[in-house]
Amino acid sequence: MIKKKNNLFLLKIFYFLYILSLNFHQISIFQLDNKIFFKLADVFFIILFISFLYNLKNLSNIKIDKFDILVSVFSLISIIQFLFFKNSISIVGLIASIYLFSIYFIYKILLLNNFLRIIKNYIIISGLAASVLGILGWIMIQFNINSPFILVYDYPFKIGNAGRATALFET
C-alpha cells in the first residue's frame, strides 16, 4: 500500500509541474522547425506521461468507452496522413494529435480516479502564479522597466504606462 501511495505521489508531483509549466509557455528549450519550438511544458509532459504509464497499474478506475474511440480517430487520421505524405507538416500533425489525445486520456483517467480536487488545486495555484507574474509585469512597466511579463501597447485610454499583462503565456 505504501508503494502505491509513493508512486501516485510522484505522479501528482509531475502533474503539478506540468500544469505549473504551462505558465512559462514562452520559454523554449529548442527549435524543431522555423515555427515550431519545444517548450518547457513539453518536457514536463514527457515526464508526466512516463510517470502516468508507470502508474497505470496503481490507478484502479480505467474505462475506455465509445467517446474515447471517437477522440482517437483524430490521431488515426494524422497517422494515415503521415503514411501518405511524409513531410514536416504531417510529422507535426501526428505529434500534435498524439499529444492532445494523451492529454485527454491522462485527464480522463485521473478524473475517474478521484483526482478532481487535486486538479482544481493545481490549476488554482498555477493561476495564482500567472496572476502574480502579470501583476509584477504591470508594476514594472509603470516604472519603465520592460519585462517579458507584459506586452507594451499604445492604448488610446490608459492610466500610467500602457501594457498588457501576459505573465509568460503566449497570446
Image: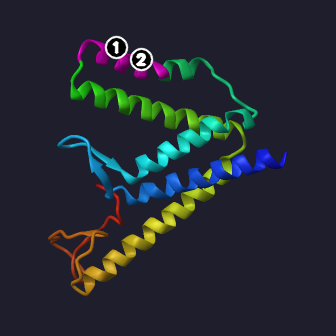
**What is the image's colouring?**
rainbow
Q: Quadrant of residue 131?
A: bottom left
The image shows residue 120 at horizontal and vertical percentages of: 61, 54
Q: Is residue 108 magenta?
A: no
The image shows residue 170 at horizontal and vertical percentages of: 30, 55
Label 2 neighbourhood size at 10 Å, few (<14), some (14-19), many (20+)? some
Circle 2 residue:
76
Seen from the viewer's position, the closer of residues 80 and 160 is: 80
Q: Is residue 80 magenta?
A: yes
In which quadrant of the rendered image does the C terminus lie? bottom left
For image coordinates 23% across by 28% down, the residue present is 89
**Which segment is the magenta one?**
72-85
The image shows residue 22 at horizontal and vertical percentages of: 43, 54
The image shows residue 82 at horizontal and vertical percentages of: 30, 18
Magenta stretch secondary structure, dominant: helix
Q: Quadrant of residue 108?
A: top right
Secondary structure under tag 2 reads helix
Q: Specify the amino acid type for callout 2.
A: Leu
In which quadrant of the rendered image does the N terminus lie? top right
Q: Disc 2 versus disc 1: distance between alpha carbons?
A: 6 Å
Q: Which mark is residue 72?
A: none
Residue 135, above or below 125: below
Residue 112, above or below 166: above
Secondary structure under tag 1 reads helix
Q: Quadrant of residue 100?
A: top left
Seen from the viewer's position, the closer of residues 83 and 169 is: 83
For image coordinates 33% across by 82% down, the residue present is 139
Tell me whether the residue at label 2 lies in contact with that at label 1, contact meaning CB atoms closer than 8 angstroms.
yes
Toward the right, the furthest residue is 1
Circle 1 residue:
80
Residue 34, above or below 68: below
